[in-house]
Amino acid sequence: MKDNNKLTNTLYVIGIAGIIHFIYYLALDGDWKLIVPFVVLASFAQLVPIVLSGSAAFVGNGIINLFLLIEYGIGASLIAIISGLLTFFVVYSPNKRKINWFRFICNIGMFYISVTISYYATFYIPDPYRILHAILCYTVYELSSVGFNWAIERSLKIPNRRFQFKSFIKLLLPFFLGMTMFLKIIMQQLYFNQLVEIAFAIIILMIINRYTNTLNKQNRLLEESNQRYKSLFEQNPDLVFTLDNEHRLTSANPMLETILGYKESEVLDKPFDQALHILELDRFQEKIMQMQSGIPQHFPLTIYHKNGMLREFDITSGPTIVDNVVVGGYGIAKDRTADKEAERIIHRMAYFDSVTGLPNRAYFYKKLSELIQTAEETGGGFGMLYLDLDQFKNINDTQGHLSGDNLLVQVSRRLLETVQSASFISRLGGDEFTVLLSHVKGPEDCNRVARMIRQALSSPFVLNGQDVYITTSIGISLFPDSGTDSQTLVKNADAAMYKAKDSGGDSYCLYSAELQKAIEDRLTLQTNLRKALEKKEFKLVYQPQLDLNAGAIIGVEALIRWDSPELGEVPPTRFIPEAERCMLIIPIGEWVLREACRQSVEWQKLGYPPISMSVNLSSVQFQGDDIVNTVRTVLYETGLSPRYLELEITEGILLQNTNRTMRILRELKDLGVRISIDDFGIGYSSLSYLKHFPFDTLKIDRSFIQEMMREQKDRLIIGTLIHLAHNLEMKVVAEGVETEEQMESLTSWSCDLAQGYFISRPLSPSHLEEGLWINKSMLA
């Protein structure tokens, strides 16, 4: 030690500690650029040639040191103290090169003690300084602009006491600095020295003002930038986060808790993939590694919510670069959960059937195109099954659409359970389904699947607590044998399905060259059918109906015939089913009705007695509500009395929609026409039909008449039907009478009418007139 005095030695040690603190400040904490002007001011005050009194110098330097102490801390204040003392010792040392360093360091120790005490005392400044702050800390300009009361009010609302005291000291600095300079000026004895002091004060104030303005501007820009960043970060509707190079979360905005349920404190300083549970971890890590290499990334990511629910995001990430070095990364996660769910809903609505949940027609054609493309590239093949439920329409009409939908759902489940996973099952619409078999070696594989499907659908389905049985007709087409494009494959499978249905249903059919010939024949038939009505190629023949009691012809049945110039004479059994399939039966049936009524009226005009005209109605004509209007219009336009018109319907019509059929039949009865049920006993006969529907005539099918002389059961059925019909006040017509023995038996059983080849074949109007009505004994 340089001194035996314990106090000075202690100050020396404390001074060394202060110097170490100063060095530490400059090395780690200090922003020396902020305090350069004050260090210059403290040093330069010692160097000016004008002598200042000790009190004035102490006040000036004290104010500077106090400001630095409050604003920037102990380390900053020490810079001004050390620079001021060092300058003082250099200036006033007798030998500038031999400074008394012991005394210098002791002074530093003394100032370090006072500065430390002053610094920590600022935490306990009392509240009354608020009023003083309001009075002294606003410039004349501010007070004149906003008012003195506003200044006080604003000061009183500031909650941080330390901040108030710091602001108070900070704003007192210009006042005390000005006072110091003013004292230096007025204490000079010579005017020249006063001018020098004024000039020096102006220069110093200009330097400080310029530097302070620049610094304040930079601070304002920095603060504004920080506020913008904070607003962008915290108010962003998306989840924003930052990572370090170890993939640890360093920050996250409040949307982290809003979207994922985590608080920021729960995830900070944890690896992203551990803090947040990620579904596609490998992809995330790959993208983060690419981001760290300096490449921005955009990728989808699924993250679990804190409650376990999945949330889907679109992540945009990029590297955080400082001094051309990647120090981490940032990410913006846009929550797309609602959008993805909406996309899934739209996709499901567009590509899946709403009733069964199976892929729909659009999805089927998309998948079929993909299979064709794959098969063309690989040289492979595949098969397609086209299914149609045979009894679905009857079930849908009789039990309602809800039951029909329930049946479709049950059918789809059985198909999914039966067919292997390599297949693609879809519902095209109505009761039509398709099965795409992507791996088949030949037709036998498709046939095997078709048999499995038939077997699966053979078990009863439960509808409304009742067992219901259905069958299916299946058409099969193969790629490339049956076609090489979607339209051809579907068309040929559909044709094969109709072939299976025409064979009685509950079967399957593979498309072949022979079937193609049949299809072409059907197309030719359809084409000629469309032309036949326009070219008047149809004609009617009439088969007489004999009253077995009176022995007279009292009615005829109108039967259509077609003699095509291209196809020749086409039997009704061939062209009528095709006309029904392509809906041409509606205009053809209307023509038959009109022509039959016209002919009946013409016979009456020629003087022949009025007879009953029987006209067959197709089930297709009952699908619309126009049949009643059609009959009414035809009767009006031809002038035929309704009592001479009898409309024949088959039992199949009764199965379509009981309530609707009942309504139409009653409306027809209201017109005055008679209703006959044709071919009773060969279909889905039910005695309830005879009870509930307004029939006038029951026609016994020819199949019973032909076997009646050999089969006892047929005779019993015929006798029973005649007795039943008479009890229900209906007449009975026996069809297909070909022998005298048959007619005599029917007469003995009190059958009312008979028609067949034994009585007369169907005749043209002219032959009917010449062959029957010319014989007066046959007239009524």
Image: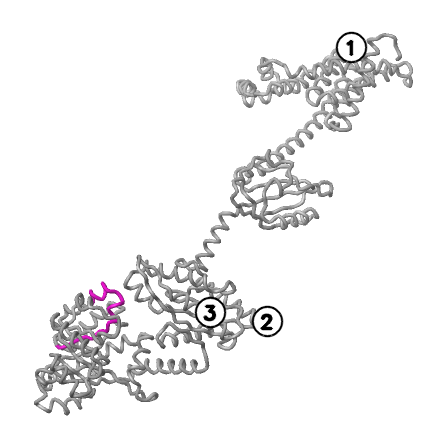
Reading the image, the residue beneath label 2 is 378
Q: State which quadrant residue 727 falls in.
A: bottom left
The picture places residue 234, in percent across and down from the top left corner, at 57, 36
Q: Secondary structure at mark 1?
A: helix
State how far apart marks 1 and 3 are (Cα). 114 Å
Q: Is residue 181 visible?
A: no
Q: Is residue 120 above or below residue 260?
A: above
Instruction: Return the disc, 1 or 2, that comes first in the chain's sequence.
Output: 1
Q: Is residue 729 left or right of residue 27?
A: left
Q: Position of residue 497 (x, y in %)?
A: 40, 73
| Crowd band around label 3 with a 10 angstrom C-alpha radius: few (<14), some (14–19), many (20+) | some
The amino acid on which the numbered mark 3 sits, given as a three-letter code, is Val
Task: Residue 408: give its label.
Answer: none
Q: Are marks 3 and 2 in contact (CB under 8 Å)?
A: no
Q: Quickly name the residue at label 3.
A: 449
Residue at the image point whose x is 78% and y is 23% from the top: 22
- Direction from residue 510 to residue 728 in the image, left or right: left
- Rendering coords of residue 294 (x, y %): 69, 48
